[in-house]
Amino acid sequence: MPSESPLAALHAAAEAVRQQLQVNAFDAPAVQRLTDFIEAQRATIQPAEREGVVMALGCFLGQCLVDTYQGEWAAGPDGSTGVGLAGKLFFNPFYLVSEQLTKGREQSVAGFFAGIPARLATTGQRKSWIK
């Protein structure tokens, strides 16, 4: 069997979660649904399942970042897989999902996602004075 490209594997995992969550798009309402799903499942995820759950849900969150904020899947400076935004920001969606699984709503992926526009605006402002 030929090996699947990493990008195709990320997309396939994100699409599987999208269908499981029964959402129509990779957008802010879908991320809110993801947050609720994580909270509902936190107590039932067994240690042996955790890595697979984080991978699948992280692919979904990453694709939401890509679609909503025109990001792109990329490798981080440390070799981790994540999403780059505006050529300046890099986020690891797997880490973000893991944090909510560990700490609960105080580390909500929806809260993080809602803060992206402010981060993008700050990034743009730093650069705006250089002409």
Image: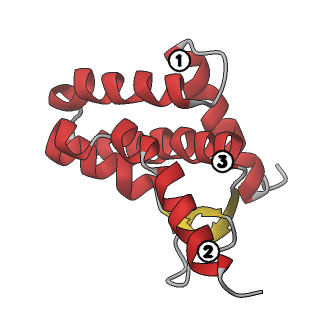
Distance (Cα) linking label 2 and label 3:
13 Å
Residue 61 in percent (x, y) is at 52, 42
Three-letter amino acid code at the position of disc 2: Lys
- The local secondary structure at tag 1 comes to helix
Please count the marks in the image: 3
* Residue 4 in picture, x, y percent from top left: 78, 52
Residue where numbered disc 3 is placed: 69
Depth check, front residue: 112 or 9: 112
Q: Which residue matches tag 2?
A: 88
CA neighbours of label 2 inside 10 A, class few (<14), some (14 to 19), many (20+): few
Few, some or many residues within 10 Å of mark 1 (<14, 14–19, 20+) = few
Q: Three-letter amino acid code at disc 1?
A: Gln
Find residue 69 and report its horizontal and vertical position in percent. 65, 47
Colouring of the image: secondary structure
Q: Name the secondary structure under disc 2.
A: loop
Give the residue drawn at x 69%, y 72%. Answer: 87
In-image side of 66 versus 103 (left or right): right
What residue is rendered at 55% in x and 27% in y?
17
Along the horizontal axis of the image, is 95 left or right of 14? Answer: left
In the image, farthest residue toward the bottom: 130
Q: Give the SS element for disc 3.
A: helix
Q: Which mark is residue 20?
A: 1
